[in-house]
Amino acid sequence: EAGVTQFPSHSVIEKGQTVTLRCDPISGHDNLYWYRRVMGKEIKFLLHFVKESKQDESGMPNNRFLAERTGGTYSTLKVQPAELEDSGVYFCASSQVGSGVAKNIQYFGAGTRLSVL
Amino acid sequence: AQSVTQLGSHVSVSEGALVLLRCNYSSSVPPYLFWYVQYPNQGLQLLLKYTSAATLVKGINGFEAEFKKSETSFHLTKPSAHMSDAAEYFCAVSDRVGGTSYGKLTFGQGTILTVHP
């Protein structure tokens, strides 16, 4: 079974440009999460989808960030325009929906390392 | 709001020595606690989880953690370190959302474990 896949693994862009990150969750996982780790800091929650609906987007930094999950499958996270402070590693995770913590374990992708110059 | 503190951003041990990685949490309700590990160029992998079934939790690769409510701690241990244990370790807490679905993870700052021959 394929795990959580993220594209690209690395992205280097200039300030003001647009970047789109993609996450393919594990098949059948309706929960999808985005997290970010800025260098030297802890991993922080950005938002949570249940299928195609945003369940919690309390961690989104500002309106330059747009997350979508059309059809409830893969998700994209677009940063437009990118700023220097957006640099970091963006992680995606997915989990099943159901009762019990065992079913709700979050499985993580390898992350996308974004560098804004 | 929940928070997680990992004492020591870097821990160095000799091969065969005890590994102890510290984690303290704050939560207004009984939390669900996790330890994840990240090997170089890989995603976060679940080591173990606390689900309130037992205070001593055994995970993969010989790791275990003990939940101590009175100390609000969930320290990770391994009796004998192996070179392959070198990685970054993250303690995380989540709460329950909507009765059955678990929400965002709140992470500690991470601890880099170095194992010397």
Image (spheres, rainbow, N blue to C red):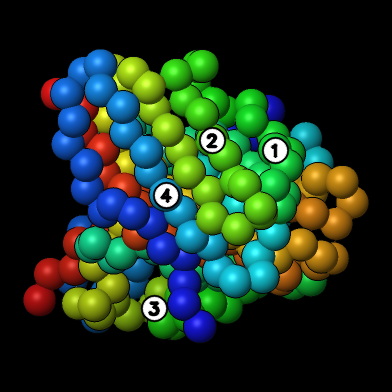
Amino acid type indicated by mark 2: Ala
Location of mark 3 (residue): B79
Taking the view exactly as shown, the residue that stands out farthest to the front is A71
Foreground pick, A29 / B83: A29
Q: Quadrant of residue A40?
A: top left
Q: Which mark is residue A22?
A: 4
Q: Are marks 1 and 2 in contact (CB under 8 Å)?
A: yes
Q: Which mark is residue A67?
A: 2
Amino acid type indicated by mark 3: Pro
Q: Is circle 4 on the same chain as circle 3?
A: no
Which mark lies nearer to you, 4 or 3?
4
Amino acid type indicated by mark 4: Arg
Pick whichever of labels 4 and 1 is earlier in the sequence.
4
Location of mark 1 (residue): A54
Could you tell me which chain the residue with mark 2 belongs to?
A: A
Q: Residue at x 79, y 71 (%)?
A: B53
Pick whichever of labels 1 and 2 is earlier in the sequence.
1
- Local secondary structure at mark 1: strand
